[in-house]
Amino acid sequence: MAQLHVLKVFVGEDGAGGNPLGVFLNGDEVPEEDRQRVAADLGFSETVFVEDANGGRLRIFTPVAELPFAGHPLVGTAWLLAREGFEVPVLRPPAGEVTVRSERGITFITGRPEWAPVFEEIELGSASEVEALDGPPEGHDLVGVWAWEDRGERTVRVRVFASRFGIQEDEATGAHAVTLADQLGRSIAIRQGEGSLILAEPKTDGSVEIGGRTELVEVSEYGG
Protein backbone atom coordinates (compact mmCIF):
# COMPACT_ATOMS: atom_id res chain seq x y z
CA MET A 1 0.00 0.00 0.00
CA ALA A 2 1.12 3.56 -0.72
CA GLN A 3 1.31 6.20 1.99
CA LEU A 4 -1.05 9.12 1.47
CA HIS A 5 -0.68 12.55 3.08
CA VAL A 6 -3.85 14.63 3.20
CA LEU A 7 -3.32 18.38 3.55
CA LYS A 8 -5.36 21.57 3.61
CA VAL A 9 -3.81 24.34 1.49
CA PHE A 10 -4.44 28.10 1.60
CA VAL A 11 -5.85 27.91 5.12
CA GLY A 12 -7.28 31.21 6.35
CA GLU A 13 -5.76 33.09 9.25
CA ASP A 14 -8.47 31.85 11.62
CA GLY A 15 -7.99 28.23 10.53
CA ALA A 16 -11.00 28.29 8.21
CA GLY A 17 -11.09 26.99 4.68
CA GLY A 18 -8.14 25.31 3.04
CA ASN A 19 -8.43 23.17 -0.06
CA PRO A 20 -7.95 19.42 0.60
CA LEU A 21 -5.04 17.84 -1.26
CA GLY A 22 -3.77 14.28 -1.51
CA VAL A 23 -0.02 13.75 -1.87
CA PHE A 24 1.82 10.49 -2.48
CA LEU A 25 5.44 11.35 -1.62
CA ASN A 26 6.50 8.01 -3.09
CA GLY A 27 4.36 8.42 -6.17
CA ASP A 28 6.11 5.62 -8.04
CA GLU A 29 4.40 3.19 -5.64
CA VAL A 30 1.22 3.96 -7.60
CA PRO A 31 1.56 2.63 -11.17
CA GLU A 32 1.25 5.36 -13.79
CA GLU A 33 -1.72 3.66 -15.42
CA ASP A 34 -3.60 3.69 -12.09
CA ARG A 35 -3.08 7.32 -11.10
CA GLN A 36 -6.12 8.80 -12.80
CA ARG A 37 -8.32 6.15 -11.21
CA VAL A 38 -6.79 6.81 -7.78
CA ALA A 39 -7.34 10.56 -8.12
CA ALA A 40 -10.98 9.96 -9.05
CA ASP A 41 -11.38 7.55 -6.13
CA LEU A 42 -9.97 10.03 -3.62
CA GLY A 43 -12.15 12.82 -5.00
CA PHE A 44 -9.90 15.74 -4.05
CA SER A 45 -9.78 18.61 -6.52
CA GLU A 46 -6.18 17.51 -7.11
CA THR A 47 -3.92 14.63 -6.11
CA VAL A 48 -0.12 14.77 -6.45
CA PHE A 49 2.21 11.88 -7.24
CA VAL A 50 5.81 12.83 -6.38
CA GLU A 51 8.17 10.92 -8.67
CA ASP A 52 11.45 12.36 -7.34
CA ALA A 53 11.34 14.08 -3.95
CA ASN A 54 14.92 15.33 -4.07
CA GLY A 55 14.51 16.71 -7.58
CA GLY A 56 10.99 18.05 -7.11
CA ARG A 57 9.54 16.10 -10.05
CA LEU A 58 5.80 15.39 -9.75
CA ARG A 59 2.50 14.86 -11.58
CA ILE A 60 -0.89 16.41 -10.78
CA PHE A 61 -4.33 14.85 -11.41
CA THR A 62 -7.88 16.13 -10.94
CA PRO A 63 -10.68 13.54 -10.71
CA VAL A 64 -10.93 13.53 -14.52
CA ALA A 65 -7.66 14.82 -16.04
CA GLU A 66 -3.94 15.42 -15.57
CA LEU A 67 -2.80 19.05 -15.25
CA PRO A 68 0.61 20.44 -16.21
CA PHE A 69 0.37 23.11 -13.50
CA ALA A 70 -1.87 23.83 -10.52
CA GLY A 71 -1.35 26.19 -7.61
CA HIS A 72 -2.66 24.56 -4.46
CA PRO A 73 -1.03 21.17 -5.22
CA LEU A 74 2.37 22.84 -5.68
CA VAL A 75 2.12 25.02 -2.58
CA GLY A 76 1.00 22.03 -0.51
CA THR A 77 3.63 19.68 -1.89
CA ALA A 78 6.40 22.25 -1.37
CA TRP A 79 5.32 22.62 2.27
CA LEU A 80 5.16 18.85 2.78
CA LEU A 81 8.57 18.20 1.23
CA ALA A 82 10.12 20.81 3.53
CA ARG A 83 8.33 19.27 6.53
CA GLU A 84 9.72 15.86 5.61
CA GLY A 85 13.28 17.18 5.37
CA PHE A 86 13.68 17.62 1.61
CA GLU A 87 15.36 20.89 0.63
CA VAL A 88 13.75 21.50 -2.73
CA PRO A 89 14.04 25.08 -4.06
CA VAL A 90 12.42 24.15 -7.38
CA LEU A 91 9.45 21.90 -8.17
CA ARG A 92 9.19 20.32 -11.61
CA PRO A 93 5.61 19.63 -12.75
CA PRO A 94 5.15 19.01 -16.48
CA ALA A 95 4.63 22.75 -17.17
CA GLY A 96 8.15 23.76 -16.14
CA GLU A 97 10.33 24.79 -13.21
CA VAL A 98 8.48 26.31 -10.25
CA THR A 99 10.56 28.17 -7.68
CA VAL A 100 9.73 27.74 -3.99
CA ARG A 101 10.34 29.82 -0.89
CA SER A 102 8.97 30.08 2.64
CA GLU A 103 8.50 33.11 4.88
CA ARG A 104 6.89 33.30 8.34
CA GLY A 105 5.01 30.03 7.93
CA ILE A 106 3.76 30.82 4.44
CA THR A 107 4.88 28.74 1.47
CA PHE A 108 5.21 30.53 -1.87
CA ILE A 109 5.57 29.15 -5.40
CA THR A 110 5.97 31.01 -8.69
CA GLY A 111 4.09 30.12 -11.85
CA ARG A 112 3.33 31.62 -15.21
CA PRO A 113 -0.17 32.63 -16.38
CA GLU A 114 0.24 30.75 -19.65
CA TRP A 115 0.63 27.51 -17.70
CA ALA A 116 -2.83 27.84 -16.14
CA PRO A 117 -6.11 26.77 -17.73
CA VAL A 118 -7.99 29.59 -19.45
CA PHE A 119 -10.60 30.74 -16.94
CA GLU A 120 -13.56 32.86 -17.93
CA GLU A 121 -13.52 35.93 -15.67
CA ILE A 122 -16.70 37.57 -14.43
CA GLU A 123 -16.41 40.65 -12.22
CA LEU A 124 -19.43 41.51 -10.07
CA GLY A 125 -20.17 44.73 -8.24
CA SER A 126 -19.75 43.52 -4.68
CA ALA A 127 -18.51 40.67 -2.53
CA SER A 128 -22.08 40.00 -1.40
CA GLU A 129 -23.11 39.34 -5.00
CA VAL A 130 -20.32 36.78 -5.32
CA GLU A 131 -21.38 35.10 -2.10
CA ALA A 132 -25.03 34.98 -3.18
CA LEU A 133 -24.32 32.73 -6.17
CA ASP A 134 -25.87 29.27 -5.90
CA GLY A 135 -23.67 27.83 -8.66
CA PRO A 136 -21.70 28.79 -11.73
CA PRO A 137 -23.12 31.35 -14.15
CA GLU A 138 -25.07 29.54 -16.86
CA GLY A 139 -22.99 28.04 -19.63
CA HIS A 140 -19.63 28.28 -17.83
CA ASP A 141 -17.65 25.17 -16.89
CA LEU A 142 -14.39 26.93 -15.91
CA VAL A 143 -15.01 30.36 -14.46
CA GLY A 144 -13.75 32.69 -11.76
CA VAL A 145 -16.35 35.06 -10.35
CA TRP A 146 -14.91 37.89 -8.28
CA ALA A 147 -15.40 41.34 -6.80
CA TRP A 148 -13.30 43.81 -4.89
CA GLU A 149 -13.82 43.71 -1.13
CA ASP A 150 -11.47 46.62 -0.50
CA ARG A 151 -9.49 48.19 -3.34
CA GLY A 152 -7.25 50.08 -0.94
CA GLU A 153 -6.33 46.92 0.93
CA ARG A 154 -6.22 45.00 -2.36
CA THR A 155 -8.56 42.28 -1.09
CA VAL A 156 -10.74 40.31 -3.50
CA ARG A 157 -13.64 37.92 -2.95
CA VAL A 158 -13.51 35.00 -5.39
CA ARG A 159 -15.40 31.83 -6.22
CA VAL A 160 -14.19 29.37 -8.85
CA PHE A 161 -16.37 26.79 -10.61
CA ALA A 162 -14.51 24.11 -12.56
CA SER A 163 -16.89 21.35 -13.63
CA ARG A 164 -14.69 20.82 -16.71
CA PHE A 165 -12.19 19.19 -14.36
CA GLY A 166 -14.74 17.33 -12.26
CA ILE A 167 -14.88 20.03 -9.56
CA GLN A 168 -18.23 21.72 -9.02
CA GLU A 169 -16.73 24.50 -6.88
CA ASP A 170 -13.11 24.75 -5.82
CA GLU A 171 -12.31 25.85 -2.27
CA ALA A 172 -9.06 27.60 -3.21
CA THR A 173 -7.58 27.84 -6.70
CA GLY A 174 -3.94 28.82 -7.06
CA ALA A 175 -3.89 28.71 -10.87
CA HIS A 176 -6.79 31.16 -10.97
CA ALA A 177 -4.98 33.38 -8.48
CA VAL A 178 -2.02 33.47 -10.87
CA THR A 179 -4.17 34.57 -13.80
CA LEU A 180 -6.26 37.09 -11.82
CA ALA A 181 -3.21 38.81 -10.29
CA ASP A 182 -1.64 38.95 -13.74
CA GLN A 183 -4.83 40.44 -15.20
CA LEU A 184 -5.09 43.07 -12.45
CA GLY A 185 -1.36 43.81 -12.52
CA ARG A 186 -1.06 44.21 -8.78
CA SER A 187 -0.57 42.20 -5.60
CA ILE A 188 -3.83 40.95 -4.09
CA ALA A 189 -5.14 38.95 -1.17
CA ILE A 190 -7.87 36.55 -2.30
CA ARG A 191 -10.60 35.27 -0.01
CA GLN A 192 -12.10 32.19 -1.63
CA GLY A 193 -14.51 29.44 -0.70
CA GLU A 194 -15.43 28.97 2.96
CA GLY A 195 -12.49 30.95 4.31
CA SER A 196 -9.36 30.20 2.29
CA LEU A 197 -6.72 32.90 1.81
CA ILE A 198 -4.36 33.18 -1.18
CA LEU A 199 -1.65 35.83 -1.56
CA ALA A 200 -0.67 36.67 -5.14
CA GLU A 201 1.89 39.09 -6.56
CA PRO A 202 2.92 39.66 -10.20
CA LYS A 203 6.67 39.75 -10.87
CA THR A 204 8.61 41.80 -13.42
CA ASP A 205 9.44 38.73 -15.53
CA GLY A 206 5.76 38.00 -16.20
CA SER A 207 5.45 35.28 -13.57
CA VAL A 208 3.19 35.46 -10.50
CA GLU A 209 4.07 34.35 -6.99
CA ILE A 210 1.28 32.82 -4.92
CA GLY A 211 1.39 31.69 -1.33
CA GLY A 212 -0.55 30.52 1.66
CA ARG A 213 -0.59 28.39 4.78
CA THR A 214 -0.79 24.60 4.74
CA GLU A 215 -1.86 22.16 7.46
CA LEU A 216 -1.51 18.39 7.70
CA VAL A 217 -4.83 16.63 8.13
CA GLU A 218 -3.79 12.97 8.25
CA VAL A 219 -1.37 10.31 7.05
CA SER A 220 -2.79 6.94 6.03
CA GLU A 221 -2.08 3.86 3.95
CA TYR A 222 -3.97 3.84 0.65
CA GLY A 223 -4.79 0.45 -0.79
CA GLY A 224 -7.55 1.32 -3.21
Image (cartoon, rainbow, N blue to C red):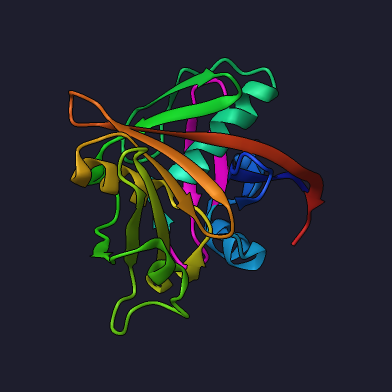
Q: Is residue 50 part of the magenta span, yes or no?
A: yes
Nearer to me, 28 or 137: 137
Can residue 171 be seen at all in this image of the molecule?
yes
Nearer to me, 91 or 109: 109
Nearer to me, 183 or 36: 183
Q: Is residue 122 part of the magenta span, yes or no?
A: no
**Left or right position of 107 against 164:** right
The x and y percentages for residue 186 are 24, 35
**Left or right position of 48 against 204:** right
Magenta region = 47-65
Instruction: Say which quadrant the C terminus sits in.
Output: bottom right
Identify the residue at image location x=62%, y=61%: 38
In the figure, 131 relative to 8: above or below?
below
Residue 51 is drawn in which quadrant?
top right
In the figure, 215 relative to 65: above or below?
above
Can residue 68 be seen at all in this image of the molecule?
no
Identify the residue at image location x=38%, y=72%: 164
**Left or right position of 205 against 216:** left
The x and y percentages for residue 202 are 26, 32
Identify the residue at image location x=53%, y=59%: 193
In the figure, 99 relative to 114: above or below?
above
What number of labels is visible? 0
Identify the residue at image location x=40%, y=58%: 158
The x and y percentages for residue 176 are 35, 51
